[in-house]
Image (spheres, rainbow, N blue to C red):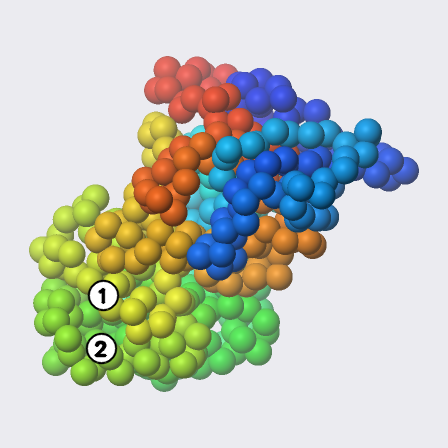
């Protein structure tokens, strides 16, 4: 389904990239576009390349070279980005687009993310009937949106009293649908994982109320069927070391990592107690866990900013930032996720705040924070072969900044231009959807 008239205004505002949405004739090669003169901060952001030319053709990057030796063909389009800074497209590794599925709100949110420099998102459980539609529209650039990779959720039966699971499986029975499945020792995991894979999900998300034995069994079967496994860092009663030992690919929430120190582990998500504040100090159990994560290649989707946006007595102030900083110093890969619902009224993505928190509160360098939002994010969604760096053969996803983010990470907000799949989206063309516009959208439906 093409973008509805509901968000037609979004493309009217981007007339410069409208023509690029049309599929080219098979007999005509896509135009080569050369981005000339920027400083490239990429891959290993400590290695900066000045005065480069990045050539794209269609959706792909076809050359990255010095501008000193640049000799353009007359047929190429030149985009002057002299004095600016180019980074790979940002990756938000924790969003919730369809907890309460609403297509127009999701599209407004996704549009905001894209114009903020986010070219890929990882959705961490929702109604896949909407997610699969959004994923297809984003893949074919029918809507202004990051690419979407989403999960099918698995948890113990007790978790499905949570009202969010009923919202995400509306019209069906929560716990009995392929994208929100209750798991017990009697579950046929081969069938459950196969049905989850059939929804188009990239991964299984292990949420809560499962013992270590089932966390491991689900992970083993999901990997056998070529799916990734994303999990909460603590699954209750499975503790963080159990989750990492199961060889999941990504664990979410740095404050949940603190439950490794719990003398008595909460037995369910509903009975969760406060995280152990001893995690704010050097503890041998935490050091051992970080060593385990580093050796297994487990990514930590830290979600540091959530604790500042929504303070809670359950998790002591600053615990996520401290744990993330320690994990980073121990060599654990950190990704950047926001764990936000689709608030479509803000002007900038909350991912900017998460990246800034990694520097200002977790003590990471700007270079490491950018790597977390690009290289590590690509690995988290299983797309390291096509995303995360600007090099030949990768997708033409990148962000042009007016100011150097290595000098001040807050410059991550100085977005001038976003390129996704080779299509250009100028930040100056963006405006948030106003409540009045959303009201008119509703009236037209």
Q: Earlier in the sequence, mark 2 or mark 1?
A: 2
Q: Position of residue 55 (x, y in %)?
A: 69, 42
Question: Against 251, is 364 above or below?
Answer: above
Secondary structure at numbered mark 2: helix
Q: Position of residue 306 (x, y in %)?
A: 25, 49
Image-quadrant location for residue 333? bottom left
Tell me which residue sits at (38%, 58%) in the image. Answer: 368
Q: Position of residue 83 (x, y in %)?
A: 51, 33
Q: Residue furthest right?
A: 27
Q: Is residue 262 left or right of residue 252?
A: left
Q: Which residue is mark 1?
A: 323
Q: CA distance from mark 2 to mark 1?
A: 9 Å
Q: Quadrant of the N terminus?
A: top right
Q: In front: 2, or 233?
A: 233
Dots 2, 1 in contact, CB < 8 A: yes
Q: Which residue is mark 2?
A: 286
Image-quadrant location for residue 154? bottom left
């Amino acid at each position: 389904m093409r973008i509805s008239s509901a968000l037609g205004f979004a493309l009217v505002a981007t007339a410069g990239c409208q023509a690029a949405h049309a599929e080219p004739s098979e007999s005509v090669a896509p135009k080569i576009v050369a981005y000339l003169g920027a400083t490239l901060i990429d891959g290993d952001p400590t290695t900066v390349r000045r005065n480069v030319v990045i050539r794209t053709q269609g959706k792909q990057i076809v050359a990255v070279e010095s501008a000193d030796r640049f000799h353009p063909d007359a047929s190429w389009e030149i985009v002057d980005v002299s004095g600016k800074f180019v980074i790979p497209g940002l990756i938000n590794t924790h969003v919730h687009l369809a907890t309460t599925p609403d297509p127009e709100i999701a599209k407004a949110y996704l549009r905001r993310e894209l114009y903020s420099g986010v070219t890929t998102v990882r959705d961490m459980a929702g109604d896949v009937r909407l997610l699969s539609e959004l994923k297809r529209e984003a893949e074919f650039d029918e809507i202004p949106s990051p690419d979407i990779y989403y999960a099918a959720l698995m948890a113990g039966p007790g978790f499905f009293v949570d009202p969010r699971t009923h919202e995400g499986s509306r019209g069906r029975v929560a716990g009995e649908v392929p994208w929100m499945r209750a798991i017990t020792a009697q579950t046929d995991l081969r069938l459950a994982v196969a049905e989850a894979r059939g929804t188009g999900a990239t991964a299984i998300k292990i949420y809560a109320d499962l013992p270590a034995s089932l966390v491991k069994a689900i992970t083993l079967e999901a990997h056998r069927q070529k799916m990734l496994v994303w999990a909460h860092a603590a699954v209750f009663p499975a503790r963080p070391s159990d989750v990492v030992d199961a060889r999941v690919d990504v664990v979410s929430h740095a404050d949940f990592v603190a439950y490794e120190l719990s003398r008595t582990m909460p037995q369910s998500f509903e009975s969760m107690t406060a995280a152990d504040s001893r995690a704010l100090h050097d503890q041998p159990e935490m050091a051992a866990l970080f060593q385990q994560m580093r050796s297994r290649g487990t990514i930590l989707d830290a979600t540091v900013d959530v604790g500042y946006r929504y303070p809670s007595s359950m998790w002591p102030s600053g615990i996520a930032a401290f744990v993330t900083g320690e994990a980073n110093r121990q060599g654990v890969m950190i990704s950047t996720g926001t764990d936000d619902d689709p608030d479509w009224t803000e002007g900038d993505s909350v991912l900017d705040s998460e990246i800034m928190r990694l520097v200002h509160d977790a003590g990471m360098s700007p270079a490491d924070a950018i790597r977390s939002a690009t290289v590590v994010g690509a690995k988290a969604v299983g797309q390291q072969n096509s995303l995360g760096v600007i090099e030949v053969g990768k997708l033409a996803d990148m962000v042009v900044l007016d100011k150097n983010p290595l000098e001040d990470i807050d410059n991550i907000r100085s977005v001038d231009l976003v390129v996704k799949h080779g299509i250009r989206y100028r930040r100056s063309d963006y405006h948030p959807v106003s409540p009045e516009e959303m009201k008119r959208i509703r009236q037209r439906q």
